[in-house]
Image (cartoon, rainbow, N blue to C red):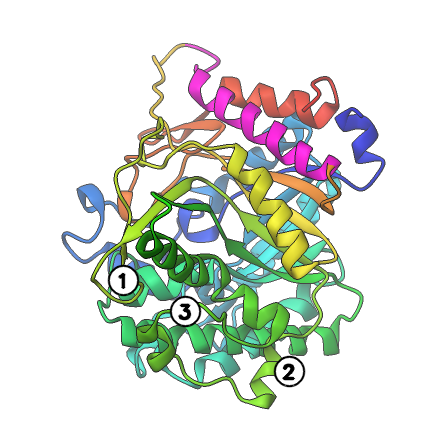
Amino acid sequence: MSPAEMSNQNFLWGVSTSAYQIEGAHDEDGRTPSIWDTFSHTPGKVANNDNGDVACDHYHLWESDLDLMAGLGVQGYRFSVSWSRFLSNGVTRNPKGIDFYNRLVDGLLKRNIKPFLTLYHWDLPKEFYDDRGGWLNPDVPKYFADYAAEVAKELGDRVATIATLNEPLVCSDEGYGRGTHAPGHKSYKEACVAAYHLLKAHGLGIRAMRSIRPQVPLGIVLNMNELTPVSSSSEDEAAWKRFYAYHNELYAHPIFFGRYPENLSSYLRENMPPITVEDSKLFSQPLDFVGINYYMRIQIKAGSNPPNFCETPKAVLPTTDMGWEIYPEGLKSLLLWVHNTYHPKSIYITENGAGLHDTWDGKSQIVADPRRVDYLKRHVRAAWEAKESGVPLNGFFCWSFLDNFEWGYGYAKRFGIVHIDYPTKKRIPKESYFLWKNYASGKLKP
């Protein structure tokens, strides 16, 4: 079956971005700071002390970006809304910010591209952090539900789907446990509290949106990877089970089953706030889809450090420039696991791509990125095999449409299928752009 035939069966080719990584215009038209504005302006937190103040300047260049996307021929664009651009200080409707997203959605529809909206891609309004620590504050899930309702009212009549959270594990683990992301805390006890409040925000957000736009497909985006023990020893097997419960199941189990996974470490079991009967119902409301972000395989061995009492040895297979082990076979097995474990109605690959070095010579019309082309081909093939095995896979979104601000790595890492010359903001398509165009048009089979 070709991609063109697949499109007729509700399969979609798309690209993804997120607000803080591409928009820029950090203090324009009523936008107020997020925790990433604060974090990226704290010396030493981001490589080269980069920040997202300008990023790709998508806020000003969005129309030409959408034209470039239309030339790609994709059927869907997954983007996130900046909470503090839509609602100044996280609570007050901001007409100019809202107008930007209305124009963006209308511009996508004009170009026959379906808008796939994500409410939260890590850029929590600064005011909520200043007031009792952001996701440590039990009131923030209620504010999130209010925000979700406002977005649903404004844009829900025109978007294809709305996802509540992007990669909540990264928010709690890297933001509150490891401290490598905003707000930069280093306490796994706090990470447990943040995780519970993120689950509550998801549930309250779904409930709020369903009451306003019951026809809009709603879901969540989870980051999962292929995880394997380094040996068959009982110690490594047990460590792998603990890590699997944390990395792949900590959010999925409450969302689909209303409970925490059984194999969480003793440390996590002791520090995760209990899920009440009411919580269980709130967290596990029916979803229309789940998005899966997949990038790598991680090997696990026994270790002594909480929260999971395990270690992740150095990769043994080739890696991307991020140090992430390239293992496309893992995408197939992961999709089958998600399907067989949770039975979601619909699955999208909402992110998959490679952080790899590429350069522009200042003259060429195309940037060569053969390693990214190979990476994407292999992962598309693995995803297609999962679909052919019965997984309800309805779309594949490449990460990312544009090179962008890559969080703690600043602008040092490139994931885009479009190269950004940051001094001039010039966009130059890469070889991978044309690969994706061929998939989207049906000229190339998976």
Of residue 301 and residue 112, the one placed in the foreground of this image is 301
Residue type, label 3: Leu
Residue 257's place in the image compared with 427, above or below, is below
The x and y percentages for residue 329 are 53, 33
Of residue 201 and residue 343, the one placed in the foreground of this image is 343
The x and y percentages for residue 286 are 71, 70
Work out whether mark 2 precedes mark 3 in sequence or the reverse, and give the earlier one: 3
Residue type, label 2: Lys
Work out whether mark 1 precedes mark 2 in sequence or the reverse, and give the earlier one: 2
On whether residue 120 falls in the magenta region, the answer is: no
Checking the image for residue 309, the label placed there is 1
The x and y percentages for residue 425 are 39, 31
Checking the image for residue 423, the label placed there is none
Q: Secondary structure at mark 1?
A: loop
Residue type, label 1: Phe
Q: Secondary structure at mark 2?
A: helix
Q: Which residue is mark 3?
A: 264
Alpha carbon separation for disc pair 2 and 3: 21 Å
Name the residue furthest top: 364
Q: Which residue is mark 2?
A: 281
Name the residue furthest bottom: 277
Instruction: Identify the residue at horizontal 63%, vertical 74% (top origin).
Output: 284
C-beta proximity under 8 Å, tags 1 and 2:
no
C-beta proximity under 8 Å, tags 2 and 3:
no
For residue 348, side relative to residue 415 (left or right):
right
Residue 322's place in the image compared with 274, above or below, is above
Residue 15 seen: no
Q: Which residues are magenta?
A: 364-388
